[in-house]
Image (tube, rainbow, N blue to C red):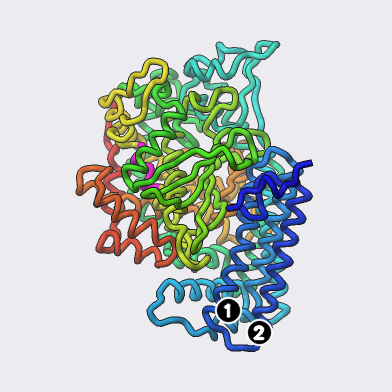
Amino acid sequence: MTDPAATRDASLGRLPFTLAPDALAREAAAVLQEARARLEALAAEAAPPTVGSFLVPLDELLVSVRDLGSHSSLLFATHPDEEARTAARQASESADRFFNEFRIDPRVYAKLRATPLPEGDAPTRLAVDKLLREMRRAGAERSEAERRRVVELSNAIDETSNQFMENVARGQRSILVAGADRLVGLPPDYLKAHPPGPDGGIRLTTSYPDVYPVLAYCDAAAVRRDLLRTFLNVAYPENLEVLSKLLRLRRELAERLDFADFATYATEDKMMERPEAVAEFLDRLSSMLSAPAREDLERTLARKRKDDPGAERLELWDASFWSQGYYDTKLRQETFGVDPRALRAYLPYGAIRDGLFELCETLFGLTFTRTRSVPLWHESVEAYEVARGGRPIGRCYFDLVPRAGKYNHAACFTVRDGLRERLPQAALVCNFLDPGTPAETARMEYRDVVTFFHEFGHLLHALLSGHGRWLYTTMSSLELDFIEAPSQLFEEWARDPATLARFARNPETGEPIPLELVQRLKDSEAMGRAARELRQVALAAISLDLYRRDPRGLDTDAAFREVWDARYPAPIDPGYHPQAAWGHLTGYSACYYTYLWSSVIARDLLTPFHEAASLTDAAAAARYAREILEPGGSRPAAELVRRYLDREFRFDAYERWALAGAGRRS
């Protein structure tokens, strides 16, 4: 039998991706045992703490546990074997429990406060300030009994959040369509990938590659309705009680730490600082977007009435409530001559990926080289070594094919934080590609191309920032409500005609996507944007509201619909329970507004590129990398933006963008 150590990749140390469940459990226990022993020795040391004798070894042991948590979280979200996912979840929760205990240790807290820091070393001072703040927020200054209860609550919150996400991952559902005649309007490659079964029926699942084309193209309203209802009821009803439990636990935690509610606790260390500021921000956007959004929806309803003269309202399966909707697609096609189904011919995954790599070389001097020497968690996963100017700077992984038990959304997972001499690693975990089609030629929806670029923006941030000194100045320590700005910004390259035309090509004919078509595509993107942005306002308001209310006896269905109806001019049917699978309610909690806030900032971050009249301007790209991406969390987010723009950011660019399609008539 081969020694597992012989197949380990050196850069992953004792945690390769191919560990059996029992081996992962043993390694997790060993990592934590060593970390606790090292922490105890540091806390008990009688000599006065210094950066070299205390802060450096403390950071190193915390990094070892963070590695365990990151590695295990990725495998919990992606591993094809249920036993391995269970072991990974347990290891992830063990790492979380270590940090929960560490944060309340009064001995470590006192030594951190007593450590003399170099006057001119701003990153070190910021790292210690962040760590001290985190420990204060965890209750390090409180009595032992209070600290014990905070740890119990924190552990329960981690376990409940993981249960919520596990239910979502396990909850894939499907509908059976009577035959291909019920899928009229779907593109040929979609129909080819979904052949009828022996009984003539076609099974459609709630995975993204199945759902979104149906909602955009299928002429049969009943099929769109049935699939959307199934999609928005994933993990219902089991997650309603899990969510209620999570809300109760977080409320108790906040109150024990003297916060009015969890929203107040969650926003305190963000750019916004207060839930009242978030509410004011959302009100500002509502005032800007409400009237144009109503016009968008009225225009879409008018288009529906051409097919159904008696239609009194838009249904969720008609318009872009949860995706690009059927009648939105019709309007864009009829107004701009853009048929997203035809676009798919020019958007094979392999060409999009390679085009992204070429773009990153143009912008940032990065090269991506595929490596097949790293044992991975699934045969569909791709691994790439990344270099800059010939010097290795990190590694990334792409896991883009849906499968049973896998995380069902799109995200960038940290694999290893880059620190000092150790290079960063990150994984894109998405669900773009049809599992029945060869990956290189699998066609992508244009909306998925934009999402691919979005997640790639996170990946670039991780790779370029992962070369600092301290764990608490890595990208993961940056304010959460700024973290989406680089990814929101990078979406713009997917919308840029000159960029898209560089690599969007029909592999069967060799024909590049017509530049004029790409420009019409970009113009069409503005249609209905106010309504799409207002939808985000409604969801952000719901996430904030759920964490401001008293959760005892709270009906999350009623609360969801109440806030939605107050913010968005189209109702949510009582038969839908989207909160049951809304994973952002665990990780982002009250802070789903992050996407909108980051979008406002990102639109302004594009200003230097627009002033240069090119999204591939070398000077603008170099400045962006230097001032926004490379520092990671070594400076406050507001300072990053000021240094890049030479001013405070403004709303002007976002407002122009959000309202670009307002008043347009088909």
Camera sees residue 477: no
Q: In this view, does 463 lie above or below 467?
A: above
Q: Is residue 437 left or right of residue 125?
A: right
Q: Main secondary structure of the magenta part?
A: helix
Secondary structure, mark 2, is loop
Residue at numbered disc 1: 54
Q: Which residue is at a point 56% across and 55% down the rendered structure image?
A: 416
Q: In this view, does 47 lie above or below 297?
A: below
Q: Which amino acid does label 1 sit on?
A: Phe
Secondary structure, mark 1, is helix
Q: Give the range drawn in magenta.
A: 488-494
Q: Earlier in the sequence, mark 2 or mark 1?
A: 2
Please tell me how crowded label 1 is: few (under 14), some (14-19), or many (20+) other residues with Cα within 10 Å: many
Residue at numbered disc 2: 45
Q: Magenta stretch containing residue 491, yes or no?
A: yes
Q: Which residue is at a point 45% across and 21% down the rendered structure image?
A: 310
Instruction: Give coordinates of residue 330: x percent, y percent.
Output: 39, 23
Instruction: Give coordinates of residue 265: x percent, y percent.
Output: 55, 67
Q: What residue type is labelled 2?
A: Glu
Q: Magenta stretch containing residue 24, yes or no?
A: no
Q: Distance between the residues labelled 2 and 1?
A: 9 Å
Please tell me how crowded label 2 is: few (under 14), some (14-19), or many (20+) other residues with Cα within 10 Å: few
Camera sees residue 490: yes
Q: In this view, does 440 lie to the left or right of 596?
A: right
User: Are circles 2 and 1 on residues that touch, CB within 8 Å?
Assistant: yes
Instruction: Give coordinates of residue 103: x percent, y percent.
Output: 62, 72
Q: Is residue 409 above or below residue 31?
A: above
